[in-house]
Image (spheres, rainbow, N blue to C red):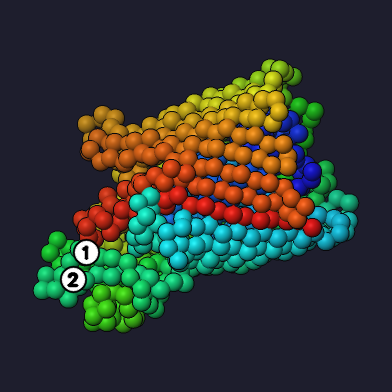
Amino acid sequence: MKKTMTLGLAVVAGASALPLQAQESNDTMVVVGSRTPTQISQIPGTVWVVEHEELQQQLDTGADLKTALGKLVPGLDLAPQGRTNYGQNMRGRNVQVLIDGVSMNSSRGLSRQFDAIDPFNIDHVEVISGANSLYGGGATGGIINIITRKGKAGEPTLRTQAGVTSGLNDDDDLDYHLDQSVSGGNEHVQGYLGVAYRDNGRHFDGSGDEIFTDITQTDLQDNRSIDLMGNLNIVLTQEQSLSIGAQLYRSGYEGHRGVYFPHLNDASPNLDDAEIRDGYSSDRNPATDRKMINVQYHHSDLLGQDFYLQAFHREEEAKFNAFPYPSPNWRNPDYYEFRASQQNTKLSGIKGLFDAQLSDSVGLTYGVDLSREKFDADQIFFDRDVTNASGALTQREARSEDRYPSYRVDTVAAFAQADWQATRGLKLSAGARQQRMNVDVDDFKNVPGGSNHYDATLVNASALYDYGNGHQNWLRYSQGFELPDPAKYYGKSPDVSVSANPLSAIKTDQVELGWRYQGGGWTTQAAVYYAWSDKAVENAEDLSVEVVDEKKRDYGLEGAVTRYFDNGFEAGSTLNLVRSEQKDADGDWKKRDARYASLSSATAFVGWSDFERSVRLQANHAFDLEDDNDREIDGYTTFDLLLSQQTGFGKLSLGVENLTDKQYSTVWGQRATMFYSPYYGPEYLYDFQGRGRTYSLTWSHQY
């Protein structure tokens, strides 16, 4: 089975359609580890591949994309369930998410990277765990590259999918989706066009109560999304090809239910006793809008080398919910003022890469990345009289102001990576990336802007040994970095001027020792790791960003094992044990603040399939977490069940998510209470609950 894989540059490589636990086959090619097509067995690092079939299996239980990946990829935290993926780290640190090599991350730390594509248009997902020096900022915890579906030569192929999900609690407790694609072509041109439509109703927790709206980062209740994606692959000559892809994506609130606050007009106004009611109307509703174009060129013999060139442009608008700000004194407010922001990002870039085979045993990959990112934001102030009279169910714009300082970030980076097959079993690799970023910040509310720049030099080195009997070991050192959010770092005070407070790259160093094995009905992969940095990025009480001059470290174990038995039976498990610590002013290592630290997690499953029908029972467990300030996050355990049957008119799947109807607070909900309460109101406003038991029926057919 041939497929197109892209990570940063256009690549065409053969790959077998294998499940995650069986992806170590020597002919499985990925580009996630080295930016060029490489067999997994040749990558000195922890690599996971989630094929579409396995991803779809999770989605058929009613899970969204980030939830499915959190259950499938060891090292990646379980998902927070709302629109945001805040805190869904990998190995305790930030993860960089890409679609066909185009980063969904930005300097502004908006956590909506998975609110970017409908899974219907995904072919497979490639993941590399740990700090990575080849991809620039944000990859301190790992890389997740989402590979979209591509057209193939042959007669037109149509694919239809439809499904419904409900917890059977209420008439509004209903989600449904309808998806359609067409693909085909000849030996010269192949194309794909897919459209996916989803409409969510209201969601209910394990007690049968309607889940309170997430007024902070917004959620996916009463949400509609449409993802329109298309691409063309043009074979120019025997050595040259051109691929053009485009996407329009919108995901936004379209409902009529909102939060009603009964005490806004009291002599001593407060946010107590709020409830969800019909009749909500606002001049700005939560939404994510993205437009993207991606052009890729490949020449297989330019100056005797493989040459790849990619140009891309992405525009994004992120809108938020009306949110109550206590004024003028948050401890004893005279009134509450509701506001809602819109934050806009534009990212353009060019990436060029040469891949040279210098000898039978030595290879060299080198290239240049250029990008420009622009950001601006405003916020609507709603009419206080209208808001108070309606209990915040009616929000009408009174005025608009800038929300954060606008800025521009220009990036120039060069990189090189060399591999040496020293012996038949031993492969050595080393590389470096030099990156320079210029940051231009505009004036903001009488706070002067300015310009500064910083340079980051990142290196990596590794050794991989193949024993020739299915076992492999590797030792790897790599660096990554993150940039403090310019929008939330500057503009808050004249004391934090741009010129006197230059941003600097916060480097993460990581070492990892890994092992993988395939044979005798087993597939396994595991790694122990240790990552450290000299600084940490945190939120102040008013949620602005500050850089803390304290050392931070994360260490742990991630792994997966699957055992294949006779007659189609299989069983397996994943494990993610992580510990996050930060050194205090006395030089002692303390548990990292629960608002930022990752939870350890584990999954286990048993399954059976005869290729016509299948069944899978899966358990998902998040461990408890407590920091040294006695902040706690309570873990939870849920179960999922999936049944599927192939028929003469397509595939039918019945999924049950949260089989035992577990009542629990999501990890994001527990963190949100720490971030927002009591500063912005009582805890119950922000304690976002997990969804109770749901039933999903999905039909899909390819013809």
* Residue at position x 68%, y 36% in the image: 609
Above/below status of 60 relative to 372: above
Above/below status of 363 relative to 392: above
Q: Are marks 1 and 2 in contact (CB under 8 Å)?
A: yes
* Residue 677 visible: yes
Q: Is residue 146 left or right of residue 66?
A: right
Residue 465 percent location from the top left of the image: 65, 21
What residue is shown with label 1?
273
**Residue type indicated by callout 1:** Asp
What is the spatial separation of the Cα atoms under label 1 and label 2, in whole angstroms? Answer: 8 Å
**Residue type indicated by callout 2:** His
Residue 491 percent location from the top left of the image: 32, 63
Q: Is residue 211 left or right of residue 142?
A: left
The numbered disc on residue 263 is 2
Q: Residues within 10 Å of mark 1 (few under 14, many from 20)?
A: few
Q: Residues within 10 Å of mark 2 (few under 14, many from 20)?
A: some
Q: Nearer the viewer, residue 79 or 456?
A: 79
Position of the C terminus, as image quadrant, is bottom right
